[in-house]
């Protein structure tokens, strides 16, 4: 993969690689949002975590980011004093593609931040990483999550029946959405942003 953007600035958000020092701010956002997150996210079942466990997790995120294994981003307010949520460009969907995941703190839900962050990472995927396809997957019952790819011009390719296990262990369906390189320029995902590499050099 080409060198990733370590920092992305959109009109209302800062997306950047997590740092271990972000652990207290992340803990505050997650703890306040547990009822909001637990129905959809397996990792939320283990919350709240001890601070040292969270620090170690963020160190692992950074290590994978630095070695181009996976790109997990924090979503911050413009002054970086509050965690709005989390997102990522995930390599698990195979060569030539990246998958976007996202969650938003309950304090910031309903303001379009997930859509803004996913648009930024869609642009990063195509214009920085040079992929041919971007994907988003979500539980069909999570209407807010499913609205994000729809707003960004992604196509609903399929709903895979009973493909994954839900947080309760029961089989659940998964919606698959995709956007192709030749579809991207005319899509709402081609949004304004600034992106910078690990040395602070501008990429976009």
Image (cartoon, rainbow, N blue to C red):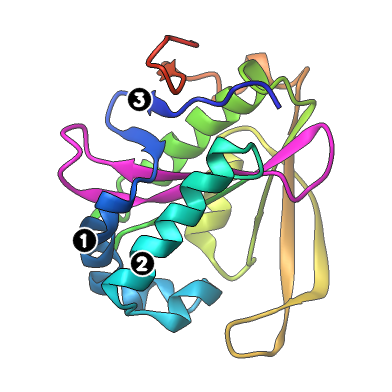
Q: CA distance from mark 2 to mark 3?
A: 27 Å
Q: In the image, is 34 to the left or to the right of 149?
A: left
**Residue 92 lies in the magenta-colored region:** yes
Q: Is the C-beta separation of discs 2 and 1 under 8 Å?
A: no
**Foreground label between 2 and 3:** 2
Quadrant in the picture for the N terminus: top right
Span highlighted in magenta in the image: 72-99
User: What residue is shown with label 2?
Assistant: 54
Element under label 1?
A: helix
Element under label 2?
A: helix
User: What residue is shown with label 1?
Assistant: 24
Q: Residue at x 74, y 72 (%)?
A: 173
Q: Is the C-beta separation of discs 1 and 3 under 8 Å?
A: no
Check residue 10 in the rendering and tell me which mark sits there, or answer none. Answer: 3
**Foreground label between 1 and 3:** 1
**Residue 76 lies in the magenta-colored region:** yes
Residue 189 point in image, percent of width and height? 55, 26
- Whether residue 37 is visible here, answered yes or no, is yes
Check residue 42 in the rendering and tell me which mark sits there, or answer none. Answer: none
Q: In the image, is 160 to the left or to the right of 105?
A: right
Pointer 2: residues within 10 angstroms few (<14), some, or many (20+)? some
* Quarter of the figure with residue 116: top left
Q: Nearer the viewer, residue 128 or 122?
A: 128
Residue 147 point in image, percent of width and height? 54, 50
Task: Say which label, 2 or 1, has the lower sequence index.
Answer: 1
Q: CA distance from mark 1 to mark 3?
A: 24 Å
Count how many numbered circles sit on residues in the image.
3
Residue 168 lies, with reference to residue 24, above or below; the image says below
Q: Residue at x 43, y 54 (%)?
A: 59
């Amino acid at each position: 993969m080409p060198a990733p953007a370590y920092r992305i600035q959109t009109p209302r958000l800062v997306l950047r690689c997590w740092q271990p020092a972000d652990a207290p701010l992340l803990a505050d956002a997650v703890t306040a949002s547990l009822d909001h997150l637990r129905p959809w996210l397996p990792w939320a079942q283990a919350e709240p975590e001890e601070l040292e466990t969270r620090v170690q997790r963020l160190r692992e995120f950074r290590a994978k980011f630095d070695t181009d294994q996976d790109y997990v981003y924090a979503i911050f307010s413009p002054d970086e004093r509050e965690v709005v949520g989390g997102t990522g460009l995930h390599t698990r969907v195979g060569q030539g593609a990246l998958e976007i995941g996202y969650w938003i703190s309950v304090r910031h839900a309903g303001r379009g931040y997930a859509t803004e962050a996913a648009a930024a990472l869609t642009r990063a995927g195509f214009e920085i990483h040079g992929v041919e396809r971007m994907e988003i997957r979500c539980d069909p019952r999570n209407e807010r999550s499913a609205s994000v790819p729809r707003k960004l011009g992604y196509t609903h390719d399929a709903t895979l029946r009973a493909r994954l296990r839900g947080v309760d262990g029961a089989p659940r369906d998964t919606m698959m959405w995709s956007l192709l390189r030749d579809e991207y320029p005319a899509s709402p995902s081609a949004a304004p942003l600034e992106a910078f590499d690990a040395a602070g050099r501008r990429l976009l």
